Amino acid sequence: MKIELREIHKRFGAVHANAGINLSVGTGTILGILGENGAGKSTLMKILSGYFHPDSGGILLDGAAVRLRTPADALRHGVGMLHQDPLDFPPMRVLDNFLLGREHQFWQRRSAARADFDALCSEFEFRLDPDGFMFDLTVGERQQLEIARLLWLGARVLILDEPTTGISANQKVKLFATLRKLAAQNKTVIFVSHKLEDVEGLCGRVAVLRRGALVGEAQPPYTTAGLVQMMFGQALAVGVRPAAPLGAPQLELRGAEFAGEHIVLRNVDLTVAAGEVVGLAGLEGSGQQQLLKGVAGLVALGKGSLKIGGRDLSQASYKEFLAAGTAFMAADRLEEGMIAGLTIEEHMVLARRGKQPAIVDWAVARTAAQAGIAEFNIKGAPASVVEGLSGGNQQRALLALLPPALKLLAMEHPTRGLDVESAIYIWSKLLMRRAEGTAILFATADLEELLRYSDRVLVFFAGEIMAVLRAADATVEQLGALIGGKQK
Amino acid sequence: MSEVVLIATLASILADSAPIIFAALGETLNERAGVVNLSVEGTMMLSAMIGFAAAFVLDGYGPMLFMGTDLAPYITVAAGFAAAMLAGALIALVVAFGSITLRRDQVAVGFIMTLLAIDLSSFAGVNFVRKPGPSVGHLPIPALADIPVVGPILFSQDAVTYLSFLLIIGMAVFFARTQPGLRLRGIGERPQAAFARGTNVVLMRYLYTALGGALIGFGGAAFSLHVKLGWSHRHTAGFGWVALAIVIFGGWDPLKVALGAYFFGALRAAATTLQALLPAVPVQVFPLLPFPLMILTLVIFNSDGLVRALSLLPLGPRRFLFGLLRSNPPAALGTHFRQE
Ligand SMILES: Nc1ncnc2c1ncn2[C@@H]1O[C@H](COP(=O)(O)OP(=O)(O)OP(=O)(O)O)[C@@H](O)[C@H]1O
Ligand SMILES: [Mg+2]
């Protein structure tokens, strides 16, 4: 299906999220949409899929002007969208999820649907059990289910909003194969990302958004420098990591054991020095989270001993960990990191450590929030609620909330969902902390990031630390093989 | 216990549980849509009064209105139920309006409606206290009632009990086999996603809240026209709260909710029997017994130990038992929905 967007405008209060965008996409093509955080990519896609109504402008499908009132309406016109966070129903079974929303039917007709489901799964080589529960599925599998569902309901245009965040390398290969196959079947695919390498490898054409406007288009062969220039209006230099002298041990683990819900991490011996950055590699859920939460005092130590800054905290409460100067930054920013519904300045008040006066001095809080906003370059005001910030700005706000001097900082996916510029910025701030003597542990799925910023990399596999590498000597290929559990 | 007594006891458990079945399944509809209707206690009370009063008043005019027809008793009782359902739906609509449109706290709105409805039932029901009036008539189903054992238990009841059976089956089929039932589950689970799949979340929440409220109202009238006949001050006291608890006990699943209601009925019957057997124990103890026992059952079924025991089973039976025992509250229960 041929799509034409004409002069699309959308404002959220003062933010002009889409400012007069004109774009057309031909049948059977894969269009990439690139743009920094907050560029307006998701907004434009939500307009095309019926979630948002444009303030002005029009949408033409195969030359006919349409009004897409709701997502279901858009799907009736053949436009389906996969959201950044899959919009499905975790407690239900896979088949229920597949069925939910089929129109004009009173009975579910489960056996017919199951047959269709199996046919779609075998066509695209998805391995999904219709009787399984959703919460057992990985993000990649939930995407596969959603793709199958949208195709079943007759989608001829598939929009994917940052589908490669949070899925494994193998699933990414499979996803790309699926999308190429769809394009070959004359479906139209729109692929939103800020990962240049994904877009370069997949898309036949790329459109770049910046601050709500379409700033350019590109066709292969792409040059990374050219795309970066378009995305940010300037070339970016990846920060080189200055060598920092290592100090005294900040974290010492001896025979430590941390139990999680699905996995137990056993017998960890690890010493991390002040000013050292240790990257944790491995498939999601291989034990990295237990280590990060454990050293921050959020998961109790089962066996062994744990010292922070030389003090034994094996049996200590979370409060004592905080007092000792540890901090944890969760991957799920709005679930564990911040409180949806509260503003930046309210977070500032909540995040303060130590004894606080019983009555909040809001003037002080506002000043602190303003200082944080300025220092971390957050696009928002002290009174902005955190869920209204874009992902990159939420991450910056989280950093702004950390107390000044820390002995140990444990982070899950510090740059997940962030564009290149924000990621570089966040790391520049983290490296400043490192220079001040903070020991940093972080987990990420991005191998480049691991090698670029770590001193040492620990590779996790099924609840064990399989290998410890010096980042300077390791390669991405080597790391990839170890993560898959291929060699010891 | 002789066989005859046992059969009679089972039959009376099924009949006496009907009001709670209606109320608990009505509340299940409400909560599946994401709306906690905390007014159950008050709704049952008021609709028990209204149901009886409407039937009573109409019965007074009966000879005049339906002269000569032998349908008169059915019509008066049916009118009582209809009035009760209307009252239940109206109270539920107030809760819906307060929580869906005005975005107030559902618990607070429901609680206030309970207090209001209880007082209203006492105030408006003054003239109907302890008056003999119409009730639902016994209605054995011809051939079926003669089947040994099963017949007298299941098919020698009255219309309200039969309706309660039909409601249980109908609602189980609705959730498990129909598209609207699946959509309803979606609304309570994740309204944003349900909206994305073409459900009009606000309209459906209103609809199911009203429908659930009507069922709760029916449960109230089932009390005064079918179990504990007539009306007296605070006639149904406590049963609304029990119905609310049974929804949780049954894990928001119609079959398990019904099972919970019958379990509660059986415990009450057992308490009455025990009372006769153990004259030394103070009588006040027995009516309270079902509550700690239900809590105990809840604790056992939701314990980690059970989950661990299940994890030893092979995948097939494990999944089956897990599906059976699992109790997940609708994730969006009590929350507001805002369409972007
Ligand atoms: N529902 C909303 N209410 C208010 N502002 C919004 C809303 N959705 C988006 N915005 C604002 O519109 C702008 C564009 O946001 P959008 O989500 O489209 O960016 P994006 O390009 O998808 O960024 P990211 O890469 O971080 O996902 C941002 O400034 C954002 O804060
Ligand atoms: Mg986005």
Image: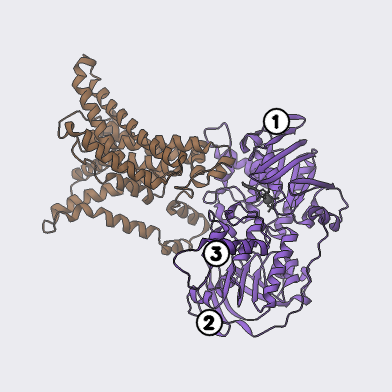
Chain colours: A purple, B brown
Residue B297 showing in the rendered view: yes
Give the chain of mark 2: A
**Location of residue B301 in the rendering, given as x and y in whole percent from the top left corner:** 38, 58
* Ligand 1 under 8 Å from disc 1 Cβ: no
Identify the image quadrant of residue A53.
top right
> Are callouts 1 and 2 both on one chain?
yes
Q: Residue lying farthest left?
A: B280
Q: Is residue A235 above or below residue B269?
A: below
| Disc with the residue nearer the chain's start (1 vs 2) | 1
Identify the image quadrant of residue B97.
top left
Secondary structure of the residue carrying tag 3 is helix
Question: Residue tagged by mark 1?
Answer: A66
Q: Is residue B167 above or below residue A424?
A: above
> Are callouts 2 and 3 both on one chain?
yes
Task: Determine the CA span between mark 1 and mark 2.
Answer: 65 Å
Question: Residue tagged by mark 2?
Answer: A304
Question: Residue tagged by mark 3?
Answer: A364
Left or right of residue A432, residue A229 in this image? right
| Disc with the residue nearer the chain's start (2 vs 3) | 2
